[in-house]
Amino acid sequence: MAYVSGDDRLPQITEQIEKQGQLPPHLDAENPDVKLDVNARDLLKPNHKVVSANAYLGARGIVKALEAGADIIITGRVADASPVIGAAWWWHGWEATNYDELGGALIAGHL
């Protein structure tokens, strides 16, 4: 049995808000066409609190768990297709650069 962690980003977000007094940069922060919603800054107010902050993980942790011999894998938040991609990646012994194969697994995972 294996557990894939790393999706919980609440400690990092809370620290940045409480200690640095700022919101984390948006992933598209360098794109001038992306604007942060005005209400997002409400999270900086003392009576507001972030209660959840998660990132979607990919298939790599699932592959590592299968390589380690896990029969059951429990994950935090992963992208929808990640379990299928991870299983196919491990089963077929693909490399991270087998883009066509991984792309096919992505489609299969969404079906």
Image: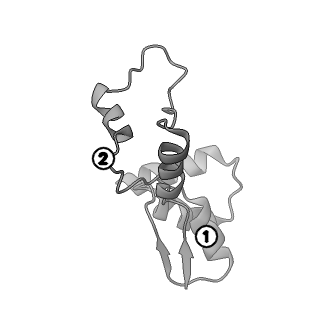
Query: For the point 62% across and 67% down, which residue is it?
Result: 63
Q: Determine contact: label 2, label 1, CB under 8 Å.
A: no
Query: For the point 61% across and 70% down, which residue is it?
Result: 91
Q: Quadrant of residue 65?
A: bottom right
State the residue position of label 1. Answer: 91
**Earlier-in-chain disc, 2 versus 1:** 2
State the residue position of label 2. Answer: 48
Q: Which mark is residue 66?
A: none
* Vertical placement of residue 76 versus 110, above or below: below
Amino acid type, residue under disc 1 in the picture: Trp
Label 2 sits on a secondary structure element that is loop
57 with respect to 41 (left or right): right
Instruction: Give how far across and how far down residue 100 sits, in percent.
Output: 60, 44
69 with respect to 87 (left or right): right
* Vertical placement of residue 5 versus 12, above or below: below
Q: CA distance from mark 2 to mark 1?
A: 46 Å
Instruction: Give how far across and how far down residue 56 sits, in percent.
Output: 46, 53
Query: Depth check: 15 or 76 in front?
Result: 15
Label 1 sits on a secondary structure element that is helix
Quarter of the image with the N terminus is bottom right
Amino acid type, residue under disc 2 in the picture: His
Q: Residues within 10 Å of mark 2 (few under 14, many from 20)?
A: few
Q: Quadrant of residue 80?
A: bottom left
